[in-house]
Amino acid sequence: MLWACVLLPRLALDGVLRRCTSSDTSKVDPPLALITGPAQKRVLLDANASARAAGLYPGQPLLAAQALLPDFIAVPHDPREDHRLRRFLAAWAYRYSSMVSLEGDDAIVLEVQGSLGLFGPWPRLERLLRDDLRTLGFQHRIAMAPTPLAACVLAAAQDGLALAETTHLRSALGRLPIRDARVDETSVATLAAMGLHKLRQLFTLPRAALARRLGPSLLAHMDRLVGDSPDPRELYRPPDAFIERIELNYEISHHPALLFPLRRLVNDLAAYLAGRDGGVQRFVIVLEHDRQSGDAETTRREVPAETDVVVGLLGAERDPARLFDLARARLERTSIPAPVRALRLVARELPPFVPAGRDLFDARPAQALPWDALRERLRARLGGDALYQLHVEHDPRPEQAQSRANPMALGKWPASENRLPPRPAWLLPRPMPLRDHHLKILAGPERIESGWWDGGDVRRDYYVVQTTLGQRAWAFLPAGSSEGAWMLHGWFA
């Protein structure tokens, strides 16, 4: 087996920056730092580039940081958010391998030997992983090795290192410090007191003596590191629903300011769907409101705690650009009753995804939208009731032969059991007099006599006629009559 490790050295900070960073890349992000520790001794866990340039650094006391830079943004560290981000990235990695496992608090490992036949050689697969991680907004280091533990150790030592043979593993690991081999702190301190600092020194020690001094757990760890013993792991399985939430740092009352966090949520949904190799047919954008803020008129009336923006699709989809376009159109048609403090995206209907087929020599212009994409865009911008499909009814009367149906509830156009004579492409809402004294009958008559049971009785003889101007019309006379006033009911194309 070959294992790749995706090391996330600044996972907590990346999680905050993903929801705080502006979409305008020309602007410099304000100084921001993560805060951790007890209330009496708060320290900086990490800081962004602007804060580090001003002199802030991890481990610095909060009071000292505030004295140096009073106006930086301090965000409390939430370990639960780190766990959520790791599981989200595991769902993303599931796209590239069915064997994905979480390693510690800062790494994800995936078995890639079985994936090389699908995605190509390791350099190409590595490039795909890095491109996705940059798009998702995570700093990373990647390495490949025959064991998952060795891949994590090598990723921390050198980004981009790849070892495919077990014979070179010991020599590559031997140059690394013991403290970087994910050994527990107690064993590291004991080995340092014995004058042992490199892994190659540890490899040469007698195993029996080492077990007596430090216990069998260290030997088991080293065996898993070099591949001398198996390393069973709990493999990740993606959940059956996608639920993500972004809490905003300030209140938002207008649609444009919500587009950046919305795009982030939709991109995360698309990455999750790609990992499952599935699609989404319906998802909900939940706007969480601050019910205590707003003007006097807003506070006097009851403000809902949440506003649901439902995005329904006619078929399964997972393209992030198309999903964002539909979500934005639905959001812009939704009024915001109160300031928004957080966004939540919930997707539970996740059917299989079948990519749309296209001809090899497709003559459609590159800018033209396929019919499915245009249909979804029209529904999102105009509303679900503005787009409908015609449904054939088993009634010979032209006024009753078709009805409107929801395209989501109706499949393909049903095949007619009986072959009917030609019907016009343009049927008028109601018949109107056809004043033309030189009509030429092209076909007919076709008698339609029905509706006596519901009060809409009709008795007509329909003809296909040609007018003086050369137009082909569908007109009728009273049944059994060869003369009289012609009534126009439709036009042929």
Image: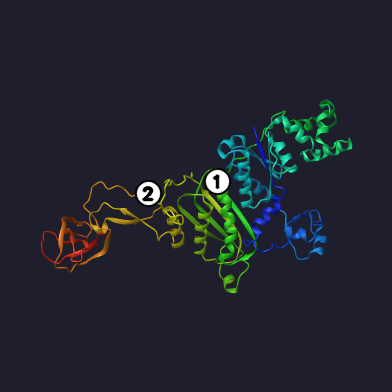
Q: According to the image, label 2 marks what residue? A: 411
Is 362 left or right of 87, judged from the image as shown?
left
Expressed as whole percent of the image width and height from the top left, the position of residue 113 reads 61, 34
Give, as a three-letter code, the residue at label 1. Answer: Ala
Task: Describe the colour scheme in one phrase.
Answer: rainbow
Dot label at residue 274: 1
Expressed as whole percent of the image width and height from the top left, the position of residue 124 reads 60, 42
Residue at 83% of width from left, 38% of height from top?
188
Expressed as whole percent of the image width and height from the top left, the position of residue 260 reads 59, 60
Quadrant of the snapshot with the C terminus: bottom left
Q: 122 or 397, which is in the foreground?
A: 122
Q: 115 or 450, which is in the foreground?
A: 115
Residue lying farthest bottom?
296
Name the front one of labels 2 and 1: 1
Give, as a three-letter code, the residue at label 2. Answer: Gly
**Quarter location, residue 337:** bottom right
- First reached walking from the N terminus: tag 2 or tag 1: 1
Mark 2 to mark 1 CA distance (whole Å): 26 Å
**Quarter location, residue 387:** bottom left
